[in-house]
Image (cartoon, grey):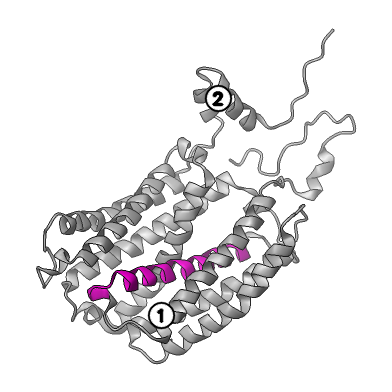
Amino acid sequence: MTQPAPSTGHRPRQAARMSRSVPGAAHAASLTDPAPGIGRRTAAIVAVAAMLPYLTIKILWLTGSSLGVGDPGLMNDPAMIGLNAMTFGMDAVGLLLALAFTARWGMRLPAPLVLLPLWVGTGLLSVIVVTAPIIVAAAGTAAFSGGPIEPWVYMMVYAGFLTQGIGLMTAFALYARDRWPAAFTTPVGLSYPSLTRPLQAVLAWGALPVAVVLGGARLVRAFEGPAAGAAQSGLKGLLAIAGAVALVVIVRGRGRGPFRRPLAAVWLGSGSLFGWGLYAMIVRSVGGPLAAGAGGPADLVELFGMLTGLVMGICGAFLLMERSGVSDVQPAQEPLEGEDREHDRRTADHGHR
């Protein structure tokens, strides 16, 4: 008499394979994905609502409107058209990802399509979320006056960035907790096999002194400029140093604290370095009004910041890919599988998805 095959406890993976070979199985596989909670859905909807005014004004500018612009010819400049198209595309991608966080199908998106744009986006938005209230408190609405753009446009845009940043980062954190629970339930010192650990060590230790120098340069610049620039430069400097130190910590893999804490520092620090450096390099390359007054040591800081952030991001990607193959079962729970090896052990997050 034939015995039934033992269950391996990996039903979601089996369902995913079935969906590629059995008609109608895709719907059944989708039911294995955890439904978004009310917190994730609310945060994502708030982020979407905050993006709409920014996307609207970008569409108006790209279609020839001069709403909120003191110099009507400014938006006809080829450099401004290109930058407006680029920033519109960035926010549109953020909107699509926020919508994905509200649905089950968002859990099946390829990981790079989620992680790469959000790594850059949260690196940019985290700085604005922290510094925008400081700038308004220190300088008031005067911080947005004096340029070719009307002050009310700046206020609307930065208020939208602030709300969008909080909503999108909250929704992404809740999404990542559901999709990659091991990053939230395991300690820094979790043991796992790694083929690229020597490379990770070289990248992490190599990025550390460069990030410290770049962070120090930004902290020095924070004491020399106006309040608006000082707040952003100071926070970028702190994020760069904290992210590089945290990267060394997680690559060494020593400690009992939760892995999510240094991971968050690496994520924001490297994303800020790369995102703001890339944006500055694009602005310098295309020229136009936004590139006025650029050059010198500040450009070198942005260039090396972009490259250092990229190196840190690559190192973190290697680490996360290898670590993702480790189950989020805590060591104390492994004996729950009996001696008969019936594969009846359940994961640590069972019942909490």
Q: Which residue is mark 1?
A: 299
Query: Helix, strand or loop at disc 1?
Result: helix
Q: Residue at x 56, y 62 (%)?
A: 313
Please check the rendered image and state whether residue 289 is part of the magenta-colored stretch, yes or no.
Answer: yes
Q: Position of residue 141 (x, y in %)?
A: 22, 78
Tag 1: residue type?
Asp
Q: Residue at x 62, y 76 (%)?
A: 208
Asked if residue 245 is positioned above or below residue 221 in the image, the reply reads above
Q: Which residue is mark 2?
A: 20
Q: Residue 110 or 257: which is nearer the viewer?
A: 110
Tag 2: residue type?
Arg
In the visual, does 206 lie left or right of 221?
right
Which image quadrant is residue 296 in?
bottom left
Q: Position of residue 75 (x, y in %)?
A: 16, 65
Work out whether mark 1 precedes mark 2 in sequence or the reverse, and give the earlier one: 2
- Give the residues drawn in magenta, as a range: 261-290
In the visual, does 143 lie left or right of 24?
left
Query: Helix, strand or loop at disc 2?
Result: helix
Q: Quadrant of the C terminus?
A: top right
